[in-house]
Image (cartoon, grey):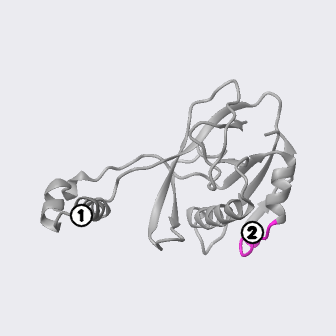
Amino acid sequence: MDHYLDLTLLPDPEFPAPQLMSALFAKLHRGLHDLRRNDVGISFPDVEKTRSGLGARLRLHGTAEALKQLMALNWLTGMRDHLKVGATTPIPPQARHRCVSRVQVNSNPERLRRRLIKRHNLDAVAAQAQIPDNAVRHSPLPFINLRSNSSGEHFRLFIRHGPLQDAAQPGTFSAYGLSATATVPWF
């Protein structure tokens, strides 16, 4: 992982930045899935500069070849008018590293009850007793709103930027560009 590329959302009076970021991220996910590579990671460099949310910049990390292959796909269709696409650039040598990962939060008691009913053959009353409405857990982490291609359900993908590290940790990335173990450069 020696290069990066920034995708910066342009201000739009009709669409708020979080909505555009969600659309961009969904398209990136499809592109990474179609590419079938596990060596492209992501980060949100402005996450700590915003009060809430991930900011207006999505950074792709990988080798120059991996980023070239990704950008050769037609995954940005419909988003190009809303973006400034940066050049593929070498990572600065003094960059630190951090893990950017997905955090699953059980925040929807209705979904948890449906799962309990399905897996343990309970009725709705028993599931309600085991998982009351006040069992909701909230996360302060920023998130992206997505829709599952398989089920059509909407969900929040919570993203954690882990602590800064001096050395890179190798590993693989999911089709979301996230990893619980591999790091991306942070600068």
Amino acid of disc 1:
Ile
Q: Earlier in the sequence, mark 2 or mark 1?
A: 2
Q: Is residue 20 above or below residue 180?
A: below
Q: Is residue 9 above or below residue 5?
A: below
Residue hosting label 1: 117
Res 129 → quadrant: bottom left
Q: Is residue 35 above or below residue 2?
A: below
Residue 150 on the magenta segment: no
Q: Secondary structure at mark 1?
A: helix
Compare residues 85 and 123 and report the one nearer the observer.
123
Compare residues 76 and 20 and report the one nearer the observer.
76
Res 10 → quadrant: bottom right
Where in the figure is residue 51, as x and y percent of width and height? 52, 47
Amino acid of disc 2:
Leu
Q: Residues within 10 Å of mark 2 (few under 14, many from 20)?
A: some
Where in the figure is residue 23, as x and y percent of width and height? 61, 68
Q: Is residue 119 above or below residue 94?
A: below
Q: What is the residue that sits farthest to the top in this orientation?
A: 166
Q: The C terminus is located in which quarter?
A: top right
* Residue 62 falls left or right of residue 90: left
Span highlighted in magenta in the image:
73-81
* Residue 99 falls left or right of residue 186: left
Q: Secondary structure at mark 2?
A: loop
Residue 75 on the magenta segment: yes
Res 133 → quadrant: bottom left
Residue hosting label 2: 76
Q: Give me the residue at 86% from left, 48% from top.
A: 64
Q: Give me the residue at 57% from left, 47% from top.
A: 50
Nearest to the eye among marks 2 and 1: give it: 1
